[in-house]
Image: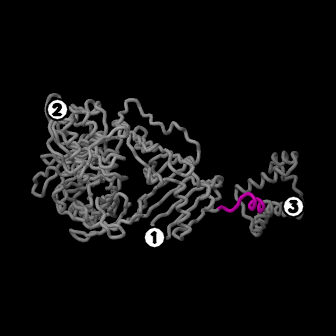
């Protein structure tokens, strides 16, 4: 043991660094230099028996060890100099140049998101790509692009193949450059060279098969990146971005490079979809309605009106064309149950956060069912036709029912399927402080599809369109619910529905007894975080009635949450002007509240993710002078994170602090606005 300590000490003094990989390499190198008989002897070496062959003299043993140590040190030094050159990030930058293909998996908040396959020509121009946006194995939206034709397959229950004309003139089709490993690596290298970022190599003896690099911005951007590099190919195989948030949280976005510059199967890019898929062809025919001199929102309402009228008259060809080229069978058979008999009303269009202008529009009309006429409320989506400027169409496949409370009650009274094929997740009513019902109020929730109250002020909302189970559960609580009418931006009705306590009560109530315990947090993966410091203050300051949970708190029932009462109260407004860097007003910019924070007594509620298209309830659009007005914010709001987008102007995100009933906040939208990960 003393000899072993002496050798280790000598190695340390000699400055020789070893690692498991280097030790193996040295051993293999030494064995290669031995004659065959000695190789066999060394390979068969048995430490317990071999000990007898060592010379008995301590002096001789030490001398032999010293000689071996010297030879090993020389060999290690030679191997380090000749076979393991120092790594430089420039090697990865060079290796990643000249991309011809990649296959990547993206991640969002540590969860799998989209999968991409892409091929490029010798100049790096995109030839074709395939994308899978997955909500589950049975619910994958497939996008294929090649030769300026994009195919999007919407899985059942839609079963639609939408084929549109999309040019890649800007080289940024579908934001693909955001996921391009070559572009990312080149960008990081440039930032380091400009002194805007620093790079640090992580040394690990446990993993000799990869290298880890940490990149930290020094220019004020709250971004930390981790890159994993294959030491053999020098390719980046993993990139993780961690963006710091104002509230101390972190947003994660990751890319795993599964293949790089590998030959891809041509079958990946074939437009082959399941039998029975309905083709909506917008490439070989002119579809939709010409906008003329109408504004976007007026054109959206007009094309919907024309489509409903043609459909009601049985003119399926015209209605199908106004539905973007939908075949006659789609309207006469698949959606026959929605065919109008008489149009009652068409509501105001609400903008949707997308690259091209899109709106969702509520309407109410009469339909015929089982020989009887009844009223239905539906929400239609109206899009601009891709590659055909100035033309609009109704995307019939995205039609969403806006259920009424009457239908919900009838569905619970008998077993007939009168609910339109959905399960009611949230039901209740909107009233004013005097108890009068509020009809035509918009209803939004942090985890339920949007809707509108009927003439009796009642509503019944299905689960959000992104939920594959078409239901909600206790894990989706707490839920932030709010409602308003378009006519009064200074009024809003809202409440918070919390998860059941143990044991779960039939009706979700909070104890009347004061609770002086330490603060606790209730949160969901939908971005709602409720920090409770005083149950008594929360109950005293919570407006409305959060209703009751079905199934003794299990939420197994229809509705899953019922008897919710939203009472209108005062609201605040954020208003201002959006300009570019030169002070020129930006018209038609979309302004959304992505997150808001409320002060409920000594408790706080933060609702995030509100910019999702199905719950973008706090939204505005700038006028010709670039002015916007974002209303209906609960009066107890303390701060809001707003996002601004405009075609050709980029995207900006700002945190606005409460400054009274009317809060003024102007925004400068730079050409290179930060794109949030």
Specify few, some or many for label 2: CA neighbours under 10 Å numbering under 14, 14-19, or 20 or more.
some
Residue 550 visible in the picture? no
Q: Was residue 80 drawn as part of the magenta stretch in this picture?
A: yes
Give the Cα distance between marks 1 and 2: 61 Å
* Towards the viewer: 454 or 447: 454
**Could you tell which of marks 1 and 3 lies nearer the N-terminus?**
3
* Residue shown at the point (76%, 65%) measured from the top left: 11
State the SS at label 1: loop
Specify few, some or many for label 1: CA neighbours under 10 Å numbering under 14, 14-19, or 20 or more.
few
Q: Is residue 10 left or right of residue 535?
A: right
State the residue position of label 2. Answer: 368
* Residue shown at the point (42%, 42%) measured from the top left: 149
* Towards the viewer: 342 or 570: 342
Q: Which residues are magenta?
A: 76-87
Specify few, some or many for label 3: CA neighbours under 10 Å numbering under 14, 14-19, or 20 or more.
some
State the residue position of label 3. Answer: 64
Q: Was residue 596 drawn as part of the magenta stretch in this picture?
A: no
Which quarter shows the N terminus? bottom right
* Towards the viewer: 525 or 78: 78
Q: Label the magenta part by its dominant secondary structure.
A: helix
107 over 224 or under it: above or below: above
Give the Cα distance between marks 1 and 3: 59 Å
State the residue position of label 1. Answer: 220
State the scheme by which the image is colored: one colour
User: Residue 230: percent from the left, percent from the top?
Assistant: 62, 53
């Amino acid at each position: 043991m003393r000899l072993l300590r002496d050798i280790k000490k000598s190695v340390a003094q000699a400055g020789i660094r070893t690692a498991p990989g280097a030790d193996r390499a040295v051993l293999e190198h030494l064995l290669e230099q031995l004659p065959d008989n000695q190789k066999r002897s060394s390979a068969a070496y048995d430490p317990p028996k071999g000990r007898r062959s060592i010379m008995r003299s301590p002096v001789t043993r030490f001398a032999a060890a010293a000689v071996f140590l010297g030879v090993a040190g020389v060999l290690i030094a030679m191997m380090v100099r000749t076979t393991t050159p120092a790594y430089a990030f420039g090697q990865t930058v060079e290796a990643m140049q000249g991309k011809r293909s990649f296959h990547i998996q993206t991640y969002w908040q540590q969860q799998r998101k989209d999968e991409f396959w892409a091929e490029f020509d010798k100049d790096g121009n995109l030839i074709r790509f395939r994308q899978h946006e997955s909500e589950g194995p049975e619910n994958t939206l497939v996008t294929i692009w090649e030769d300026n034709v994009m195919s999007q397959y919407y899985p059942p229950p839609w079963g639609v193949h939408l084929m549109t004309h999309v040019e890649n003139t800007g080289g940024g089709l579908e934001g693909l450059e955001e996921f391009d490993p070559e572009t990312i690596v080149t960008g990081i290298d440039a930032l380091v060279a400009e002194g805007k970022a620093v790079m640090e190599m992580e040394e690990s003896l446990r993993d000799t098969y990869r290298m880890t690099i940490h990149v930290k911005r020094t220019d004020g951007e709250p971004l930390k990146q981790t890159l994993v590099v294959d030491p053999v190919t020098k390719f980046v195989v993993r990139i993780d971005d961690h963006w710091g948030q104002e509230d101390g949280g972190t947003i994660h976005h990751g890319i795993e490079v599964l293949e790089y510059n590998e030959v891809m199967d041509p079958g990946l890019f074939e437009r082959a979809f399941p039998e029975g898929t309905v083709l909506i062809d917008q490439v070989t025919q002119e579809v939709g309605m010409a906008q003329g001199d109408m504004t976007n929102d007026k054109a959206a309402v007009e094309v919907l009106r024309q489509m409903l009228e043609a459909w009601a008259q049985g003119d399926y060809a015209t209605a199908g064309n106004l539905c973007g080229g939908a075949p006659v069978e789609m309207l006469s058979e698949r959606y026959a149950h929605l065919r109008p008999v008489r149009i009652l009303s068409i509501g105001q269009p609400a903008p949707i956060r997308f690259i091209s202008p899109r709106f969702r529009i509520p309407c109410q009309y009469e339909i015929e069912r089982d020989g009887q006429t009844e009223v239905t409320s539906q929400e239609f989506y109206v899009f601009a036709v891709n590659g055909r400027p100035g033309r609009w169409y109704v995307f019939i496949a995205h039609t969403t029912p806006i259920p009424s409370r009457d239908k919900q009650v009838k569905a619970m009274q008998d077993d007939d399927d009168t609910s339109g094929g959905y399960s009611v997740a949230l039901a209740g009513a909107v009233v004013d402080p005097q108890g009068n019902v509020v009809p035509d109020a918009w209803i939004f929730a942090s985890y339920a599809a949007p809707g509108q109250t009927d003439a009796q002020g009642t509503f019944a909302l299905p689960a959000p369109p992104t939920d594959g189970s078409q239901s909600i559960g206790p894990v989706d609580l707490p839920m932030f619910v709010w409602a308003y009418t378009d006519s009064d931006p200074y009024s809003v009705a809202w409440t918070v529905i919390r998860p059941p306590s143990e044991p779960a009560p039939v009706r979700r109530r909070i104890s009347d007894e004061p609770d002086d315990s330490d603060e606790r947090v209730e949160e969901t993966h939908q971005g709602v975080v409720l920090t409770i410091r005083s149950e008594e203050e929360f109950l005293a300051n919570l407006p409305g009635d959060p209703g009751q949970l079905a199934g003794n708190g299990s939420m197994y029932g229809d509705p899953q949450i019922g008897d919710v009462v939203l009472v209108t109260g005062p609201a605040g407004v954020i208003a201002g002007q959006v300009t570019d860097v030169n002070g020129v007003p930006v018209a038609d910019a979309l302004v959304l509240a992505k997150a808001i924070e409320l002060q409920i007594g000594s408790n706080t509620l933060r609702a995030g993710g509100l910019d999702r298209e199905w719950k973008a309830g706090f939204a505005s659009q700038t006028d010709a002078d670039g002015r916007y007005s974002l209303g209906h914010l609960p009066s107890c709001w303390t701060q809001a994170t707003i996002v601004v987008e405009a075609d050709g102007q980029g995207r900006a995100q700002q945190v606005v602090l409460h400054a009274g009933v009317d809060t003024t906040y102007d925004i400068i939208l730079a050409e290179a606005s930060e794109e949030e990960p």
